[in-house]
Image: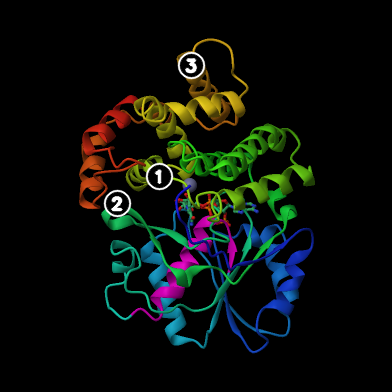
């Protein structure tokens, strides 16, 4: 096991009716800005619950954060904060709203004029951030308890992330009931995203980290079991609770502590969203099976462990077991309704040269746990994904 430092300071409040706790958790004198997306929280009652909890607080609103949150919109929120008395942010939504809030929280006090620099320097110059909390409405990204934010810039086709010790949410409210209003495809997206977060930290090479391995296998098996049930039994609270908790755990730091990590699937996938607007999970489902095929020699030991322990494939040669596991993974995504080829989204690969160029511009030229996914390898993975 590698050395590691782990700090996960977000206070998690989990369960039915827990949005009501906000009033006890946010400082009484806070001047709060509610930040949300396209309006789902208005029709599913979440916004009303937040207002009830914050009835004694000074509250203002900034809505309209789109999926794959746009830099161009977020800087509007930064302006808004400069002109209003705000000292606390509350994100209400999925990963896009929470990531957008993380960016806003750091951009408000950022010492340089060029705010995109927060992304292009991976948050290196951040010295402070407004305090913020979140009410999660879509289990998927893990953003609710981690220190990662992914922001898109529409005008330049950039989608990049930054990390910072200043962007852990103070409090995360996780009420599985608020996920009942999610459309089926967003539930499926969330399951795929959490599954692939786990694989990015598990399918590398062995370092004899038994706790992390079995923890990852537990999350994967939970997502496999509950994934298809979530679509068949849309009002099953326990299923939603298991998925919500699994998705948070899949990217809150503990799984990846002390083990090698890959993340090449995510970096290649981000370009697909930046160029074609596909959902985050769709892009992951397209890239991952081909990346596993491409790197199967280097990942052989863990792929075999995955095949045997997660899928129960123990018959046939090692080669066959790995084949079965990669095939079953793709099939799991397809069964959830998340298509796994570029052609399923009417894309023919014409943008591959531009995406490769973007990877190069962003310095993503040596990806994966061995830093051996060069631009040539990335190109092969994109081509195999058509
Ligand atoms: O905008 P509203 O109207 O709220 O609708 C949203 C949005 O259209 C809807 N939705 C959310 N909760 C709902 C709901 N609709 C009905 N009922 C509810 N309870 O769902 C749509 C998608 O929301 P979004 O926040 O975009 O989805 P997700 O949580 O999948 O977030 C995706 C973003 O997170 C980034 C992705 O790249 C993408 O930009 N990621 C963030 C990570 C992180 N911070 O750690 C890691 C991930 O790998 C990922 O990259
Ligand atoms: Zn992801």
| Residue at (63% x, 44% y) in the render | 183
- Percent across and percent down for residue 243 are 67, 45
Q: Which mark is residue 263?
A: 1
| Residue at (47% x, 46% y) in the render | 259
* Element carrying mark 1: loop
Q: Which residues fall within the magenta stretch?
A: 91-110
Relative to 232, 248 lies left or right = left
Q: Quadrant of the C terminus?
A: top left
What is the chief secondary structure element of the magenta stretch?
A: helix
- Residue 219 versus residue 316: which sits nearer the camera? 316
Tell me, what colour scheme is on the image?
A: rainbow
Q: Which mark is residue 157?
A: 2
- Percent across and percent down for residue 216 are 58, 41
How far is disc 1 from disc 2 in space, using C-alphas? 20 Å
The residue tagged 3 is: 318
Of circles 1 and 2, which is in front? 1
Q: Residues within 10 Å of mark 2 (few under 14, many from 20)?
A: some
Quarter residue 155 falls in? bottom left
Relative to 269, 89 lies left or right = right
């Amino acid at each position: 096991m590698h050395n590691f430092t782990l700090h996960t300071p977000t206070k998690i409040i989990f369960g039915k009716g827990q949005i009501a706790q906000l009033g006890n958790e946010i400082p009484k004198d806070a001047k709060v800005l509610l930040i949300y997306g396209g309006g789902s929280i208005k029709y599913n009652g979440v916004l009303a619950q937040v207002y009830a909890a914050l009835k004694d607080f000074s509250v203002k609103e900034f809505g309209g954060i789109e999926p794959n949150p746009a830099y161009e919109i977020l800087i509007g929120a930064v302006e808004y904060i400069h002109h209003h008395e705000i000292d606390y942010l509350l994100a209400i939504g999925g990963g896009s709203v929470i990531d957008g809030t993380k960016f806003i929280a750091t951009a408000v006090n950022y010492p340089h004029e060029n705010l995109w620099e927060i992304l292009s320097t991976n948050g290196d110059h951040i010295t402070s951030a407004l305090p913020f909390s979140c009410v999660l409405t879509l289990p998927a990204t893990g953003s609710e308890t981690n220190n990662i934010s992914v922001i898109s810039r529409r005008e330049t086709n950039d989608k990049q992330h930054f990390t910072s010790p200043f962007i852990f949410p103070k409090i995360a409210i996780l009420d599985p009931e608020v996920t009942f209003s999610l459309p089926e495809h967003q539930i499926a997206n969330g399951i795929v995203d959490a599954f692939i977060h786990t694989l990015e930290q598990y399918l590398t090479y062995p370092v004899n980290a038994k706790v992390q391995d079995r923890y990852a296998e537990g999350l994967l098996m939970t997502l496999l079991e509950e994934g298809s049930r979530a679509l068949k039994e849309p009002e099953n609270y326990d299923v939603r609770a298991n998925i919500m908790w699994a998705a948070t755990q899949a990217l809150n730091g503990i799984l990846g502590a002390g083990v090698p990590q890959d993340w090449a699937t995510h970096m290649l996938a981000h370009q697909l969203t930046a160029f074609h607007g596909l959902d985050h999970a769709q892009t992951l489902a397209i890239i991952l099976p081909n990346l596993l095929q491409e790197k199967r020699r280097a990942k052989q030991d863990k792929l075999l462990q995955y095949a045997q322990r997660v899928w129960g494939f123990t018959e046939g040669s090692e080669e066959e077991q790995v084949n079965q596991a990669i095939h079953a993974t793709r099939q799991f995504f397809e069964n959830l309704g998340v298509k796994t080829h570029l052609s399923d989204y009417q894309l023919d690969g014409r943008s591959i040269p531009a995406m490769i160029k973007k990877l190069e511009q962003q310095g993503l030229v040596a990806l994966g746990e061995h830093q051996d996914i060069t631009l040539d390898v990335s190109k092969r993975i994109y081509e195999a994904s058509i």
